[in-house]
Image (spheres, rainbow, N blue to C red):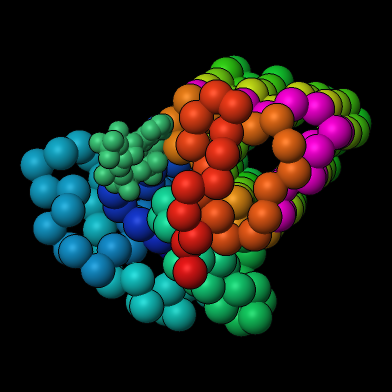
Amino acid sequence: MKNNNTLVIIGAGGHGLVAADCAENIGHYNEIIFLDDCLEKLKDKNHWHIAGPIDSWVEYDENVNFIVAIGNNTIRASILQQLSAANRCLATLIHPTAFISKHSYIGPGVVIFANAVVNIGARIDEGCIINTAATIDHDCHIQAYCHISPGVNIAGGVNVGKLSWLGIGSSVVEYITLAQNTQSGAGAVITKPTQSNKLYLGVPARPVRSLI
Ligand SMILES: CC(=O)SCCNC(=O)CCNC(=O)[C@H](O)C(C)(C)COP(=O)(O)OP(=O)(O)OC[C@H]1O[C@@H](n2cnc3c(N)ncnc32)[C@H](O)[C@@H]1OP(=O)(O)O
């Protein structure tokens, strides 16, 4: 029977597996189901299975909890918006080793993985990924559908525009605004406000190409 201890994870790639592992560590869910268009993906891999393609989410009612575990921000946003419009329940996964200030806000559909930190006054909007050991310092605002990759450090008071992807190990100095769909490459250090839809690389980070 599907109930509010059932977690449906859309996307069975590496990110989906980390999300499932996180959910197991949280301990609240007694059933974890994957949906993915590649039905063979988890074959011989572990104890989870894929119950159907992505669009079979319509068969699961308002009593189950959904996580969209797709790294692509635009695709994740689109599916989350469909789920919300259909009144489905978006789960929030926070690994037990993450530190989350009780004076922060974590939106629906957010995942926060092991050893991440979200400090006082921070706001993480719907559908963001705060990946392993990323730190979001005081008073930051991470707008909807961002991916903050493993090991990213964001100093205090930074505003990250929606759909942004900060690459592994990159960092952002305090009190600047990153425009919508900012992307930083691995190891970049962002020291100035960014323009929307641009990829930034290097130390200090410079815009290298447009993303649209
Ligand atoms: C749990 C998880 O796994 S979450 C996923 C985390 N993954 C990440 O954060 C990945 C971040 N991705 C990157 O940094 C990528 O290198 C990108 C997106 C910046 C560029 O990728 P591509 O467009 O495929 O570029 P490509 O690899 O062809 O490199 C193009 C040039 O940029 C350089 N370059 C690539 N990445 C970087 C970087 N982070 N910093 C500086 N230069 C870089 C390359 O050396 C190459 O230079 P060259 O032309 O002089 O040889």
Q: Residue visible at 36% across and 77% down? A: 56
Compared with 110, 158 (above or below) is above
* x then y, percent, for residue 199: 50, 49
* x then y, percent, for residue 129: 56, 44
Residue that extends furthest to the left in the rendered view of this protein: 44
Total marks shown come to 0
* x then y, percent, for residue 3: 54, 59
Q: Is residue 66 visible?
A: no
The quarter of the picture showing ligand 1: top left
Residue 124 on the magenta segment? no
* x then y, percent, for residue 146: 60, 50
Residue 61 or residue 120, whichever sits in front: 120
Q: Residue visible at 37% across and 78% down? A: 55
Q: Residue visible at 30% across and 52% down? A: 12
Q: Can residue 107 be seen in this view?
A: yes
Q: In this view, does 49 lie to the left or right of 129?
A: left
Q: Quadrant of residue 117?
A: top right
Q: Residue visible at 55% across and 46% down? A: 207
Q: Main secondary structure of the magenta part?
A: loop
Q: In this view, does 136 lie to the left or right of 62?
A: right
Q: Is residue 40 left or right of residue 93?
A: left
Residue 165 on the magenta segment? yes
Compared with 129, 196 (above or below) is below
Q: Give the range drawn in magenta.
A: 157-179
Quarter occupied by the N terminus: bottom left
